[in-house]
Image (cartoon, rainbow, N blue to C red):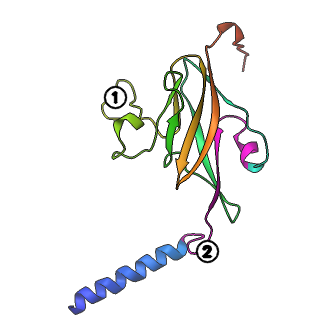
Amino acid sequence: MSIFKRNVLIAASAGAALLLSACNGVGSGSKPESLRVLPRDGNLATALSDPSAPVSAGRVYTCLRSAVGLYVTFTDGSIGDFSTRASWISGDKSVVRVSSVDDPATSADEREPVPGSDGLFYAGGTLIPVAPGSTVLTATYLGMSATLPVNVVALDLNDLVIEPA
């Protein structure tokens, strides 16, 4: 091995070690402990801060896209959002479809295309309501799974309340 190649290898190794040392928790032994699927709504912060808090079924309106998130709790107590890395499945695609992994290598039937776009897909965890009904969403990540019941309802314009700002 030439001196130049050896020096490049040493520099690359040192750079990698420096980058890894800057990452909090690398090598600390922290590992995924549990998964939770939660609606991305006004109650998200409460649900994340209290793992024992009950999570009600996600409510989705037929005319609106919405999203759910997959949150991983690690053994050190930290929580991470892995929504775009999870594999998502709807129990009944005639009620709601859910876009899966944000990876171009993922099969097209797992990703939901954005209508009118050329090659753009919704982020993982995006719900595309189809018709009123109920189903269960399942998110899988690192061999672990979590579920959330989802109710799709038709939007009743009589339920809308518009208040002045």
In this rendered view, identify the residue nearer to me: 123 or 161: 123
- SS assignment at label 2: loop
Q: What amino acid is found at the position of numbered circle 2 in the picture?
A: Ser
Coordinates of residue 139 in the picture (x, y in percent): 55, 43
Looking at the rendering, which quadrant does residue 121 occupy? top left
Q: Name the residue under label 2.
A: 28
In this rendered view, identify the residue nearer to me: 60 or 159: 60
Location of residue 29 with respect to 65 vertically, above or below: below
In this rendered view, identify the residue nearer to me: 5 or 35: 35
Residue for point 23% across, 88% down: 4
Q: Give the range drawn in magenta.
A: 23-48
The circle on residue 81 is none
Coordinates of residue 70 in the picture (x, y in percent): 59, 45
Residue for point 49% across, 46% down: 84
Q: Mark 1 points at which residue?
A: 117
Q: In this view, does 133 lie to the left or right of 45?
A: left
Q: Is residue 29 left or right of residue 19?
A: right
Image quarter where the C terminus lies is top right
